Image: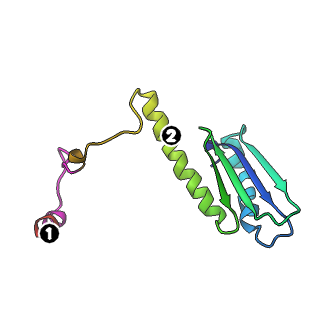
Amino acid sequence: MLKFLSKVKIEFNALDPRVASCMEFLAQCNARKAKESNPACQVLVKRRTDDFPPQITVTFVNGVEEAFDATSTPAQAIRTMILEKGQLLETEQMFREAGEKWPVIIPEEELHQFAPGTKVSACWLYLFLVF
């Protein structure tokens, strides 16, 4: 998860009963496997004393920053989102390294073409013909 991030900032008041997501996310960030995936990623913890709601802010390696309200977003949902965006970043980088334009724009008519060498199953053919 951390391999896609350059910085993680976790802010919470330790006495706030809504800190569960922050604590879980912090534990995930401090896991050995996560740290080994990107030792350069900064994990900052800001312990607050005011009523500011728990918040997790992540900065992706491409500089995009995203903040999450940790009172309503579970740590697993934040982790899943980071992994999904990270896969998109990897795909983008792969295309750019190959000298291809990004984003790839596929013409509408090509989206509906059958790929050569593939079979159309009878079930899909039936549905196609019926509707």
Left or right of residue 64, residue 93 in this image = left
Dot 2: within a 10 Å radius of its alpha carbon, few (fewer than 14), some, or many (20 or more) residues? few
Q: Quadrant of the C terminus?
A: bottom left
The local secondary structure at tag 1 comes to: loop
- The residue tagged 1 is 131
Q: Is residue 28 visible to the viewer in this orientation of the structure?
A: no
The local secondary structure at tag 2 comes to: helix
Q: Earlier in the sequence, mark 2 or mark 1?
A: 2
Mark 2 is on which residue type? Glu
In percent of width and height, residue 122 lies at: 14, 64
The image shows residue 56, relative to residue 51, as above or below, that is above
In percent of width and height, residue 64 lies at: 60, 43
- The residue tagged 2 is 90
Tell me the chief SS of the magenta region. Answer: loop
At x 66% / y 54%, what residue is drawn? 67
Q: Which residues are magenta?
A: 112-126
